[in-house]
């Protein structure tokens, strides 16, 4: 994932999970790939699954921190979009 090829990483993780559906490492890799693809909800699901299985894993904890940051940024962007939308609507009246 260091090359940031999230699509390829996601595909490989999916292939691994077809063979072994409960493979924790593959779920983790898929979660990281989804986070890189900005699919925050699915990334959160996978990373929380892995965190329950391996709560002391530093890589998992770091990925959860990146997820929290991505969720915060996403929320801020949505607020700006909706604020702009509502201000335009009030100007039209």
Image: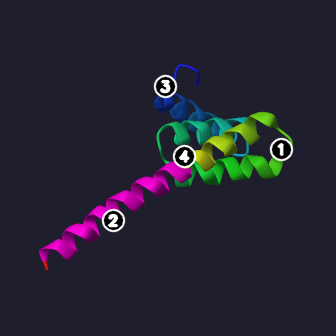
Residue depicted at 75% across the width and 34% down the height: 59
Asked if residue 90 is positioned above or below residue 40 in the image, the reply reads: below
Query: What colour scheme governs how the chains and residues are painted in the rendered image of this protein?
Result: rainbow
Q: Earlier in the sequence, mark 4 or mark 2?
A: 4
Q: In which quadrant is the N terminus drawn? A: top right
In the rendering, which numbered label is found on residue 83?
Answer: 2
**Secondary structure of residue under mark 1:** loop
Mark 4 to mark 1: distance in Å? 22 Å
- Which mark is nearer the camera, 4 or 1? 4
Q: Earlier in the sequence, mark 2 or mark 3?
A: 3
**Secondary structure of residue under mark 3:** loop
Mark 1 to mark 2: distance in Å? 40 Å
Q: Main secondary structure of the magenta part?
A: helix
Q: Which residue is mark 4?
A: 70
Q: Earlier in the sequence, mark 3 or mark 4?
A: 3
Magenta stretch in the rendered image: 71-92
**Percent x, y of residue 30:** 60, 39
Q: Earlier in the sequence, mark 1 or mark 2?
A: 1
In the rendering, which numbered label is found on residue 54?
Answer: 1
Crowd rating for badge 1 (residues with CA inside 10 Å; few <14, some 14–19, many 20+): some
Asked if residue 47 is positioned above or below residue 91 in the image, the reply reads: above
């Amino acid at each position: 994932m260091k090359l940031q090829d999230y699509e390829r990483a996601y595909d490989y993780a999916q292939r691994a999970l077809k063979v072994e559906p409960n493979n924790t490492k593959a779920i983790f890799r898929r979660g990281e790939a989804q986070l890189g693809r900005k699919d925050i909800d699915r990334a959160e699901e996978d990373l929380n699954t892995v965190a329950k299985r391996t709560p002391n894993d530093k890589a998992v904890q770091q990925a959860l921190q990146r997820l929290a940051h991505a969720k915060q940024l996403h929320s801020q962007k949505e607020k700006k979009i909706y604020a702009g939308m509502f201000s335009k609507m009030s100007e039209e009246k």
